[in-house]
Image (cartoon, rainbow, N blue to C red):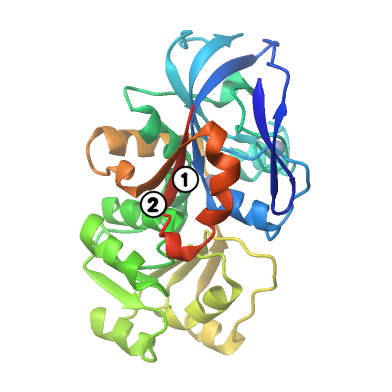
Amino acid sequence: MKTLVCTTPGQFEYQPGVKPELTPDHAILRIRRIGICGTDLHAFEGTQPFFTYPRILGHELAGELVAADNAPGFKPGETVTFIPYFNCGHCVACRAGKTNCCVSLQVSGIHMDGGMVEYLSVPTYSLVHGDGLSVDELALVEPLSIGAHGIRRADVQPGEWVLVVGAGPIGLGVMEFARIAGGNVIALDINESRLAFCRNKLHVNHTVLATDANVVEQLAMITSGDMPTVVIDATGSLRAINNAFQYMAHGARYVLVGLQKGDVSFSHPDFHKREGTLMSSRNAMRADFEHVIASIKDGQIDPTTYITHRVPFGQVRDDFAGWLDPANGVIKAMVEL
Ligand SMILES: [Zn+2]
Ligand SMILES: [Zn+2]
């Protein structure tokens, strides 16, 4: 079995692996699609928090169910994805149903070896039915679920102004689910071509270039002076995160979906006078995966428009470094097996 191992930052190696055997309460998947995520790019660069090497990356996966033990309702041969956040089931977060932020969470492809392999064993509790989606669509369910979860955390109400900072793949998902929740989306990014993508493909009516001198004034103009009542960071950039506190309306919620390594800082008086709410949004839950799949099935989102690059598994090592270069315009690279 071929595997692709990130041996150290900046280095990939194809290595022979052992095809997994069926064990109790587990399923074997034949991997068909691997979506490449910002986390994978940061892991390769060596800038991802909580990361050790060597590691097999890959957590945005679609595959064929080869065999399963104790998976009622799942049939060999069906197309599935899975929730790649493995939880302990008994910590304080798990007991509260917040398995996405389990105290000892193990994310496939981050804390443990993931899906850049031909066959993968996963716990059966993590399986999600493909429900008629294509393997391309299914491999996009996980990153979209991150956005759906962020919007659920923010509890976006119809008619609210939702500022989404960062128009990468995670930010695009945030925008889609903000719209589905009835929010009025404003996209903010430093890259004009990404903003053009939001206008043309996602029908986002309001976009603001983050490098403009008068971002606050532009946001005030768009929101008739109110400013956004929901601000969501999807950049994972410390500078962007610190900067966006000033975009909050009085009474606003600020949700950090992106993650970076440093300490966030903001003016307490400015935050206090707004009675701001700051929260993080980690991973996603089964309800988010189901919401995403239903939204794709309903035609409310067509995430395959995000796929800008496609490669066979054998070519990932050679192409991967290029996906880090903004000049290549990667939104989502998809690996085919
Ligand atoms: Zn991801
Ligand atoms: Zn737990």
Label 2 secondary element = helix
Q: What is the quadrant of the N terminus in the image?
A: top right
Q: Residue at x 34, y 27 (%)?
A: 134
Residue under pointer 2: 173
Checking the image for residue 256, the label placed there is: none
Label 1 secondary element = helix
Q: Is residue 282 visible?
A: no
Instruction: Report the side of 216 relative to 32 (left or right).
Output: left
Query: Ligand 2 falls in which quarter?
Result: top right
Q: Is residue 129 visible?
A: yes
Q: Residue at x 68, y 31 (%)?
A: 89
Cα separation, mark 1 vs mark 2, equals 7 Å
Residue 185 vs 145, above or below: the answer is below
Tell which of 97 and 188 is nearer to you.
188
Evaluate if marks 1 and 2 touch, with contact meaning CB atoms under 8 Å apart.
yes
Whether the residue under disc 2 has CB within 8 Å of ligand 1: no
Q: Residue at x 48, y 68 (%)?
A: 254
Image location of residue 76, percent across then percent down? 48, 8
Mark 2 Cα shell of 10 Å, populated few (<14), some (14-19), many (≥20)? many
Q: Amino acid at mark 1?
A: Pro
Q: Amino acid at mark 2?
A: Gly
**Image-quadrant location for residue 215:** bottom left
Residue 290 vs 240, above or below: the answer is above
Instruction: Report the side of 227 relative to 269 (left or right).
Output: left
Image location of residue 18, percent across then percent down? 73, 18
Residue 255 vs 306, above or below: the answer is below
Instruction: Report the side of 113 relative to 337 (left or right).
Output: right
Instruction: Report the side of 93 relative to 295 (left or right).
Output: right
User: In the rendered structure, which disc, 1 or 2, sits on the residue that comes first in sequence?
Assistant: 1
Whether the residue under disc 1 has CB within 8 Å of ligand 1: yes
Residue under pointer 1: 143
